[in-house]
Amino acid sequence: MNRRDFLKGATSLSVGASVLPLFKILPASAASQETAVVVIGGTINSLDIHRSGTNRSSYQVAINCYDRLVSFGTKQMPDGSLSYDYDNVQPELAESWEISDDGTVMTFRIHEDATFWDGKPVTAHDVKWSLDRAVSLGGFPTVQMKAGRLSSPEQFEVVDDRTFRITLPFPSKLALPDLATPIPIIINSEVAKANATDDDPWATEYLHRNPAGSGAYKVARWDAGQQLVYERNDKWVGGEIPGYQRVIVREVPAQSTRRALIERGSVSASHNIPNKDAKELASKPGVKVVSTPIENCIYSLCTNLDFEPFKDKRVRQAVAWSIPYQKIFEQAAYEQGMPMWGGTDTVDKINWPQKSPYDLNIEKAKALMAEAGYENGFDVPLSFNLSHADWAEPAALLIQQGLADIGIRATIEKIPGANWRTVALVDKKLPLHLENFGGWLNTPDYYFYWAYIKGNLFNSYNYDNPEMARLVDDTLDMAMDHPDYAPNVKRMIELAFEDIPRIPLWQPTLNVAFNESVEGYEYWFHRQMDIRALEPA
């Protein structure tokens, strides 16, 4: 069943549309059935998801402008809202596929009518070039592809113009869903190669500012730091033609301004609104708020093991016992989401996220600090992403107070969102910092692959435990009904809580506010707005 069929039997999500020129917001009366306006608090810093340093807000371009071989279907949530369906892989550029009996060969048939924006047919040659690029550039894209055991150009084969084959070293439960994440986008290889150089064979400089896709929307204009304007591709074959001819995504850093815009009806939607606003706007007439628990995601405090005191796990445990979790949940999360503290000492289940055994206990924290030789404490910067100030700043202030109670003198450091990914995740330089990683593929072992393996992007704290690495490697491809799967995952969770480089605070929700006259919003694991589903009410 497609998204619009879902909506026929469900409560519509109502939102309004209006147009924001560069420096002036038009009144709500300027809304049209052709244009929707979405405001975000983050900054789009690149149009190429494969580029080193591309931040989370920029992922939306990969989603809305490019196709993948496959995508996920849609399901209805208990509250009537819509969500992607991890258990339902559906065609996008591939009209069909077959998987060999031994699970190691996947053969895809490309949709015969699929074309890039310039009219060139999408072929298996474009698919190979694009996946070769994803596994060759290094960094985040290459590691993401490896999660599905896609690691070498030799695995990708052009059978004919419309037939593409992938060969895996062994079966993996993550291989097919990995192809539905934002990373394995299919790029117009002729355009890219025409703009490549000897120093830049994958055209990263060109594609940074010039997408070359076959997706539902094209980029009509990008004013860095201000707005991104999408124009619909009426020849898209990867799904139903979107309802809006144009979607304008405006960057509005000030939280209060974003709230005022949605309350006045001056914009169609405000994406990823703060928990405080979500709680208060839910009762406002003319505003609809959808809050969806973010699967496989935890807001956490991370202790960098390159920082001398945090090399001792007793110090890390002391930090975990010093945190005023309940106050943070009330004052930073506004009680939106699920608490991730105060669990049992024994790990007896494999669901993830789950509560850690830590809670506020200053005496226990002080004893651990003294045992580790830090009874007099130490100085440390406590960093957060300024784009996440709505929750991270109040959390940091409360953490700072808790740390002071055990002698740790934390100085709060606010880092601009445009710089955060490079400083925190790529360079991994921050001694103590707040992070919000969520795993795209909804299994516990996938989360641990990204967050607890040395060198992987979201291990921003340089944690390195050989036992954890072995468990993740053994389990990542394993079927979830395999007899070793549950014991392996339980041991991973035990190690995460014992070594505690990443201190869980709470599992968040993704909050999106709409005014009247738009429907079709669907939650996705990547936490970006999939504008393809939006349409006038």
Image (cartoon, rainbow, N blue to C red):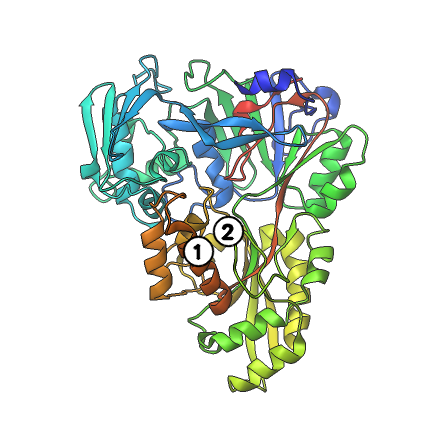
Q: Dot 1: within a 10 Å radius of its alpha carbon, few (fewer than 14), some, or many (20 or more) residues?
A: many
Q: Give the residue at x 28% y 42%.
A: 135
What label does residue 437 carry, if any? 2
In the picture, measured across the screen, residue 521 lies left or right of residue 150, that is right
Q: Is residue 443 left or right of residue 535?
A: left
What residue appears at the point 34 percent right and 12 percent down from the top-left corner?
Answer: 113
Q: Position of residue 13 (x, y in %)?
A: 68, 25
Compare marks 2 and 1 and give the one earlier in the sequence: 2
Front-most of residues 258 and 225: 258
Residue 134: percent from the left, percent from the top? Answer: 30, 40
Residue 409 in view of the camera: yes
Pick the front one: 310 or 222: 310
Element type where label 1 sits in the image: helix
| Mark 1, residue position | 451
- x then y, percent, for residue 40: 60, 39
Q: Is residue 175 left or right of residue 537?
A: left
Q: Is residue 67 visible?
A: no
Q: Circle 2 sits in a helix, a strand or a loop, which is it? A: loop
Badge 2 vs badge 1, beta-carbon distance below 8 Å: yes
458 to the left or right of 79: left
Residue 369 — which label? none
Instruction: Relative to 496, say whether 157 is above or below.
Output: above
Q: How many marks?
A: 2
Up the image or down, 287 lies above or below 403; here it is: above
Q: Amino acid at mark 2?
A: Phe
* Crowdedness near tag 2: few (<14), some (14–19) or many (≥20) residues, C-alpha within 10 Å: some
- Considering every residue shown, the one lying at the far front of the view is 483
Q: Residue at x 36, y 32 (%)?
A: 185
Query: Disc 1 residue type?
Result: Ala
